Image: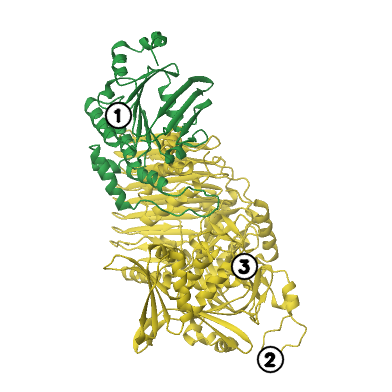
Amino acid sequence: MSKPETPTLDLRESYTEKYGFHDEEQHVFKSRRGLDREIVAQISDMKGEPQWMREYRLKALEIFEKKPMPTWGPDLSTIDFQNIYYYVKPTSEESKTWEDVPADMKRTFDKLGIPEAEQKFLAGVGAQYDSEVVYHKIQEKLEKQGVLFLSCDHGLKEHEELFKQYFGTVIPSADNKFAALNSAVWSGGSFIYVPKGVHVDVPLQAYFRINTKDMGQFERTLIIVDEGAYVHYVEGCLPAGEQVSLGHTWVNIETVDRGDVVMDSNGRESRVASTRVLPYKGDMLTIVPLSSANVFRLTPEHPVLTVRRRDVAARRAPRGNWKPEVSSVRLRAAEPEFVPAGQLEAGDFLVFPVSRITRENEALTRDVVRLLGYYLAEGSTYIHKRLHQPVVTLTFSERERESIDEVKALIHAVTGKRAIEVAQPSRHAVNLVVYSQHLRDLCIAHCGQGAAEKRLSREIMELPADLQAQLLETYLKGDGSVYRKRKHTMARACTVSRTLAWQLQELIARQGHFATINVRKGGPDTIQGRAMKRRDQYILYFSHDKQQSQVRKCEDYFLVPINRIDRNPFDGPVFNFELESSPNAYVAGGFAVHNCTAPTYSSDSLHSAVVEIIVKANARCRYTTIQNWSNNVYNLVTKRALAYRDATMEWVDWNLGSKITQKYPSVYMMEPGAHGEILSIAFAGKGQHQDAGGKVIHCAPNTTSKIVSKSISKDGGRAGYRGLVKVQKGAVDCRSNVNCDALILDEASRSDTYPYMEIEEDKVTIGHEATVSKIGDEQLFYLQSRGIGKDEAAGMIVSGFIEPIVKELPMEYAVEMNRLIQLQMEGSVG
Amino acid sequence: MSATPELVIKDLHVGIEGKEILKGLNLEVKRGEIHALMGPNGSGKSTLANTLMGHPKYEVTSGEILFKGESLLEMEADERSRAGLFMAFQYPVAIPGLSVANFLRTALNARLAPSENDGSGAVPKKRGIAPKEFRALLKEKMALLKMDESFAGRYLNDGFSGGEKKRAEILQMAVLKPEIAIMDETDSGLDIDALRIVSDGVNALAGPGMGVLVITHYQRILNYIKPHKVHVMVDGRIQISGGPELALQLESRGYDWVRNGKEAVAR
């Protein structure tokens, strides 16, 4: 999966130069490029740190400057330390309540007829995502147990005594050049304290720490597991919830993966070249366009395809507190450009691209499509319990005789069966019933099942526009209403399925009309005298013959004004991906946004973290990392744990992404009975070098350790194991076992094994096994001879290879990991 | 039984690393038939099996292989398998970490699912056998081969004994239900009990729906699997074909009899 390198970089660079971190309004403080005493001191000042930490940082900087670049591993000579921004402090937090919402905005709400509860929701006052609820519940439970789980910055602020007692004791600044760098400029990361005897039964994930401080690219993590306690910490693989267009439907951004096809800002399909998750702390913008259901969130740095209102203003005096009027001619002629979201203002125009993806489908004839439109509005399907027959029913009002007759004719044409007409005089309704598996299959395949789950199939979304018009027409006869307003014909439709609402908006756009969607919030309600819980409703409005007065139609897109922009503090992961196409831009919430340029410093970035863990007597800690950085990141991380009497420390370390990774998690077994375990997996593709492994240091007698390393290399990638087993003088009766296997997928790839042993005692048991294998032609042929395609076969061999370590992951990660591996393997053989 | 044979091999020449092994081989196998192909070491028996299945190492220099009327030569091994061809390997390879059940389900689903690329660029729909249904199927077939249920969870051929490997091959055949099955020296390395179990399995599967080509060095397996036709291959060509009695003749007179006297024997 190669991506067109040059256009992407050009866009990014010009963006950084033009808008980057020079926007004074966005940041309270930004450091200039490069690293020196002044910058380090500034970082400490901005964080309001105690004097000892400031001195610690400055001392670390001196060490960093003195230490030479390590030359024993991968080539790091291309890192330009002076070209990096080391710290950006976002704007001060502002808390937002309904009272803070500006008066003119409230008026706009009133004009639009949005009830207050919904206004509050839109203003970002209410909780927006279920995940936050989950977060609060977990936080509550942790607090009850006395567990501390916060950012390292907060850890220092709020628990200075405890923090100072352990910080830097496991990995001193002088340990290595990159540990020194981290010690000088660290920001963010996690601080965890688990009190004596407490078992934390859910894995703590970086994700759950949403309301705390920032994690930088130089994050610092400090974990203390007190006697007899247990914790599992997971970093990586972080979920969130923004909707991204795949052209035919929307998905949560975090589910987008390398190789997936999404719709780009030109309405064409494009493949995702890479994905990344970045920790982010700062303002999160909520952009509410004219069509308020199309609201979306992004970071202020995130570029959005826009026409600025001020650039297309009409030469007319402003009227009252109206937004400046625009000149339609200038607006249509304007070339939309990418502008960082933080610079946008209410009234600016967003670009709503219209999908250009069209595929004919023989099965979807005019009759079928019209019938599906009716079904979408009026139908349901189920299996008759007694008869075990598949049933499709459509319900109409008695007055809709014309529709009833058409549906009967359509059912006959599509299924060859006659629909049974059942009158329900008490409800003034007519039911049409047909027993047809064929129709049931069609309906489920193309419309989904259940009102809230209704959605259109990809085939429907990609039909030619004239067929889609048929579906819209019959759908609107059911769920919609068409009425005259002044001289114009307006259409209104209502559904409880958000996906369907957005899909209809897209279909309507392909007819040349822009539909607005507003949300009517659900909640307790009384319907026909009965207390009910009403679902959120999505209400679409559009006109066949009148352009929305505030929206402009251009050739391939609509320009839709922003009604309001909210700014709220946010702390958590943000998601982004890069496309293979140029421009490197996609569609979020219906509108074109650029791939995020957030903290990217130059074409290559540096991630240099330090993780220190103390596992006290009888305690156990497991630390799982799933590293999938984009392929321009130098990932140089120092991780070390101290394990005391009868304690267990386990590192599960996955390295899939990055350009170069150097990471050797280590366990120091300080007292008898301690056990250390390292499971390391490295996958290196084109242009990647994974120098992974682990170190176990036996400092006390009767300690045991195990290292299992699996490395896979393909497409010229280089993956390997570099490890150390050390037994100090006096540490008798130790046992250690090292097992490293390498799998090489093609001739161009490479695997290295550097097992170091420093054994200063005789009475020890040390085992070492290493294998290097190639995916053999015989293995591939064997699987292929059973009907399995070549790529899938290779994927199965790789999955089998790492199976012993996948088994150690929590279920959802194991599934995800197998998927990632399959993806990495696509097109890799043959 | 069908009129045209499912498998038709015409004047097949095959080489490996420039050396010609098969030198004009002709053979036809129909569904419902059991053929035995016998020959001394180095006569090209395994080359034929691997060439039929599409091993990339073997190069077809001339001739034709038709399967159900279509040429196999341009097809990859997986396509041949999905078309209904099967080979039981002489030396099945191990795939550590891949369980027998997982492997077989993937293989079965590869048959049930539509081809990966129909040219439309659309994502192929996930179809295939439900896990529950599959477990029942696997259990039934394992019982047929007197295999312990724990077998399904073991890694494919990893640490299997010789007998277990061969039984696993027949299990795959039972699950995938090919139209033509080639059994490459399935009897080698089997003790008498294992041989009986494997043969019983093959006999249970063979029938009007499946044709079998049993490739073997020894006559022994033919005591259990009764062939309709026997072919003797020497030096890359079938030298004699005949009924079941030919196998017995060979057993008593040896392959030299064919080498030396082939001209004298009517074909």
Residue B9: x and y, percent?
Answer: 46, 27
Please give the letter of the chain rendered in green: B
Is A91 above or below relative to A365? below
Q: Chain of mark 1?
A: B
> Label for residue A354?
3
Residue A340, position in %: x, y?
64, 69
Which residue of the protein is positioned furthest toward the right in this rendering? Answer: A315
Mark 2 is surrounded, within 10 Å at the Cα level, by few (under 14), some (14 to 19) or many (20 or more) other residues, namely few
Q: CA distance from mark 2 to mark 1?
A: 91 Å
Q: CA distance from mark 3 to mark 1?
A: 62 Å
Residue wearing tag 1: B162
Is the residue at mark 3 from the same chain as the one at mark 1?
Answer: no
Say whether residue A225 is visible. Answer: yes
Q: Position of residue A234 (x, y in %)?
A: 41, 57
Whether tag 2 and tag 3 are in contact, CB under 8 A, the answer is: no
Considering only order in the chain, which callout, 3 or 2, is on the residue closer to the N terminus?
2
Q: Is mark 3 in CB contact (under 8 Å) with mark 1?
A: no
Chain A tint in image = yellow
Q: Residue B18: which quarter of the image?
A: top right
Q: Which mark is residue A555?
A: none
